[in-house]
Image: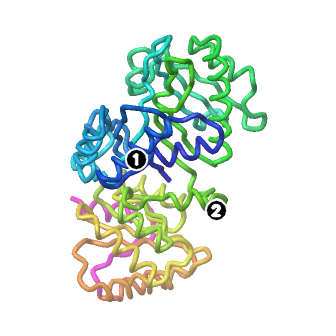
Amino acid sequence: MNLHEYQGKEILNSFGVEIQRGIVAETPEEAVEAAKKLTEETGTGWHVVKAQVHAGGRGKGGGVKLAKNLKEVEEIAGEIIGMNLVTPQTSEEGKKVNQVLITEDVYYPGDSEPEEYYMSVLLNRATGKNMIMYSTEGGMDIETVADETPHLIFNEEVDPALGLMPFQARRIAFNLGLSGKAFKQMTKFVTALYKAYTESDSSLFEINPVLKTSDDKIIAVDAKVTLDDNALFRHKDYAAMRDTREENPVEVEAREAGLSYVDLDGNVGCMVNGAGLAMATMDLIKQAGGEPANFLDVGGTADAERVEKAFNLILKDPSVKAILVNIFGGIVRCDRVAQGVVDAYKNMGNIDVPIIVRLQGTNADKAKELIDNSGLAVESAVEFQEAADKVHKVLS
């Protein structure tokens, strides 16, 4: 589950990570009031207006702007709220901005120049360890840094059983070229950041930039946070942060119906029971010359109501040219699934895309007979290759 910047900062702050303070606003008037409050609390005279959408590169799309007075806060907030923000991480249509974050200006003058760093915490699946990735080149796309100056990217692997050791936090601060107060502040920052990552059950914490202010404070100016959906039952307060306006509406509908659905860019819809079989089915579609349009796991109770809901979700994608239903009947009987497919087809009326149904397992022979004798425009298959051939045929 992705979070907005202000939500990620709330989590960071709760674990002792120093952040750039801010207040969320949904109207230009609220933005002005937020700016006034920040001035009272922090003394900041300038404010940064930041679009709150689930996408990076907001500044490049005009979603992050500096306001030097209250009039500019109101004007900029009015421009950003309601706009379709297009960034390198959105579609061509962009994402509608429903709210902005009004933040304090932390780039104030002092004894030294502010410096920006990049830092993220994530799982290295190759080693089974957590990894802190960091660089002196903050404020830039980390992909660009990796391509052009890979020697400026550092990795610190952390054994989950041991946790982040003090010498590792010090090594990170040293590699960033820090000393004195800034060195101590960075070791404290890294330790708190890693604690926030592990104890919030996150899959990603990305801070870009981490800022060393002119008076040697270390703060998180941005926060991109992805929480592990499977652990949300332990964090009811985090689950309440979900903003469905930022998510694919079909995926939201599927989740509410208890179906595991992920939208993809292909032309063959697939309905499967079991994640492993779903992955194999997508491979099958690729080998048949198609592209999977979705990942859809109906689970072990593929009754008529559930199958009908799954069909409806798949058919909301106009690019779908065929549907492959691939069910292995272990706990669930194949004939019951076949009856569900037939009933769902009749309830939905005319379906204008070809449907191939492969049912294997308990009562598979009865299931094939049900499909073949239904009188509906549904083709049955028994073997994987047979299903692949029929997919290829309808796409040709």
Q: Where is residue 311 in the image (x, y as percent from the top left)?
A: 36, 74
Per the rendered image, the range of residues in magenta is 376-396
CA gap between label 2 and label 1 equals 33 Å
Mark 2 residue element: helix
Work out whether residue 289 can be spotted. Answer: no
Mark closer to the observer (2, 1): 1
Mark before the other along the chain sequence, 2 or 1: 1
- Per the image, the residue denoted by label 2 is 233
Work out whether residue 209 can be spotted. Answer: yes
Vertical relation: 233 (above or below) 154: below
Q: Position of residue 305 (x, y in %)?
A: 44, 84
Q: What residue type is labelled 1?
A: Ala
Residue at x 23%, y 50% (from the top left corner): 83
Q: What residue type is labelled 2?
A: Phe
| Closest to the observer, 4 or 144 | 4
Asked where in the image residue 125 lies, by quadrant, the reply is top right
User: In the displayed structure, does residue 263 sit left or right of residue 204?
Assistant: left
Mark 1 residue element: helix
Q: Where is residue 37 in the image (x, y as percent from the top left)?
A: 44, 45
Asked where in the image residue 237 lies, by quadrant, the reply is bottom right
Q: Position of residue 236 (x, y in %)?
A: 61, 62
**Mark 2 and 1 residues: CB-CB less than 8 Å, in contact?**
no
- Per the image, the residue denoted by label 1 is 34
